[in-house]
Image (cartoon, coloured by chain):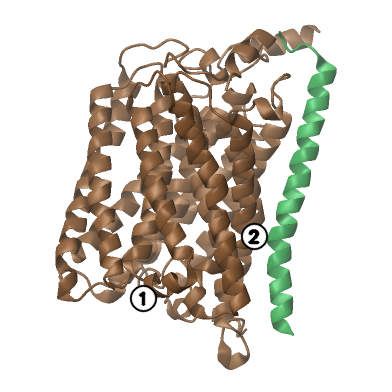
Chain colours: A brown, B green
Amino acid sequence: MAEVLTHAEHDDHDHKPHGWRRWVYATNHKDIGTMYLIFACTMFFIGGGAAMLIRLELFQPGLQFFDPQFFNSLTTMHALIMIFGAVMPGWTGLANWMIPMQVGAPDMALPRLNNLSFWILPFAFTLLIGSFFVPGGAPAGGWTMYPPLILQTGAAFPMLIFSIHLMGASSILGAINVIVTIMNMRAPGITLLRMPLFVWTWLITAYLLIAVMPVLAGAVTMLLTDHFFGTTFFTAAGGGDPVMFQHIFWFFGHPEVYILILPAFGIVSEVIPTFSRKPLFGYEAMVYATASIAFLSFIVWAHHMFTVGMPLAAQLFFMLSTMLIAVPTGVKVFNWTTTMWKGSLSFEPPMLFALAFLFLFTIGGFSGLMLAIVPADYQYQDTYFVVAHFHYVLVPGAIFGMMAGVYYWLPKWTGNMYDLKLAKWHFWLSTIFVNVLFFPQHFLGLAGMPRRIPDYAVQFTDWNMVSSIGGFGFGLSQLLFPYIIWKCVRGGERVGNRAWEGAHGLEWELPSPPPYHSWTTPPSDAVIARGAEH
Amino acid sequence: MPSTDMAADEERRLRVRRSALIWALIAAAFYIGFIVLSLLRGAK
């Protein structure tokens, strides 16, 4: 007993290491979460820089600044950096910060594994971004790495494959940590169906990660052996099949889309009730809808490949299964809307971003339904319509969801309220420019402009100019984001435990900022009952 | 309520370890298994 009390007392003190050791040897979930978020933000600006260069080249027809090979490298690297460097680590950072606090645990279950999964990333991305400087330049075959094109990559090829293995390993380790934490570290009384939606969506995301990252690893390993060891998995001349790669890739790739978006669903499900001052409508339906979306994500992959050619039955199956995803997604949109119905709404920055998510993600969902229709897809495939579709899903979807989360929890993390006025500026500039950037791309695609080209026919000029102006505006307005965070970390109006009046959840029962070790003693039944109101 | 129950702590530690090992094995089996399977199949 005496030992236990000593241990409990010990936990009450921070005893956090100082200097570089705090970060390099970090095992604390908040420190690791912070490193993940800083890393994701850095990658967001590097990937965003590539996007600015792409829009610069596309501002008008003709080749202005870059040769086509470098342009293709920019599009490839933009996608890889944004997906694997910005969005996925961003979610892992938020998971690290919030899951232990939300389930009443002192830390993640496997802190040293947590350290490893983070520190793999800087090496992976040094390798990937370093490929710009090797003979032949960075990979230029698209983030989908379709053979035989990708096999023409120069010295960057093994760097690409190795960096993807590292990213995959990092994601899997992070996912194991999330699952083990949620399944074993919940405070007594936090049953599965009392967990916040963010924890639920992350649990399902973690299962998806463990299921599909190995598939990507297998696919890129086959590319590696085709390139260096004389195998012909994807080379028709040797009896292989390049289409097989596309099937394997998209078996990973479509669930990957949900890996990027499900945690945003969780955040929006936390933010909307808070600023509507009402419990979430249909909590259990939200959980089951998330699980259904995750399940369906495994049986829709070939909708990315309709034009490749497949039997009619397969086309019908993949078209209908894809459309089926609209059902659980519709349940979610309905429940978010109904949560707001007759609520006492207020429009602080997290709510603004959540509302923009709701409207704009739904636009991405609708264009996704259009793409799911086989004969229509024959028209849209490989045009800017597809670019518009997935950017509506990923920018005002995943990125806005992440921003809603950061603006929601930042006062909790720092103990300070951020500059609300500046954050609203950030919101309005982002929302206006993201539409100026991506909405015209629907028109360009419907008019027939192909994607992944550095030059285009003159009739596409006007909307490309508009899109580029939107891109520059969106890019520049993002500079506000780190500035607002930096300013908030340095000081601001102090906030109490419950930074937002309508907020519910165990994290709001902790002080702001929370102690170094979150819940050193499990929350009491009364605290759980207060915090677990959905 | 302070966590003073050493037996519960120990039980949880074991549970975490067991759960981590199971998930690590599943992930490793998927990861390595898929690569090996595809390479073996390709070698035929």
Task: Decide which of tag 2 and tag 1 comes sooner along the chain.
Answer: 1
What secondary structure is found at the residue carrying circle 2? helix
- Residue type at mark 2: give it: Pro
Chain under label 1?
Answer: A
Report which residue position mark 1 lands on. A136
For the residues labelled 2 and 1, the Cα–Cα distance comes to 28 Å
Tell me which corner region of the image, top left, top right, bottom left or bottom right, holds residue B40.
bottom right
Q: Residues within 10 Å of mark 1 (few under 14, many from 20)?
A: some
Is residue A415 found left or right of A100 in the rendered image?
left
Helix, strand or loop for disc 1: loop
- Please give the residue where the numbered disc 2 appears in the rendered image: A214
The picture places residue A120, in percent across and down from the top left corner, at: 54, 49
Between label 2 and label 1, give the one nearer the viewer.
2
x 50%, y 32%: residue: A269
Is any atom of residue A174 visible in this view? no
The amino acid pointed to by label 1 is: Gly
A201 lies left or right of A345: right
Please identify the residue farthest to the front as the structure is shown.
Answer: A342
Residue in the foreground of this view, choosing between A504 and B32 = A504
| Position in image of residue A496 (x %, y %) | 43, 10
Identify the subunit bearing mark 2.
Answer: A
Asked whether the residues under the numbered discs 2 and 1 touch, taking CB atoms below 8 Å apart as contact, a structural biologist would say no
**Which circle marks residue A44 in the picture?**
none
Q: Which residue sits at x=78%, y=28%?
A: B13
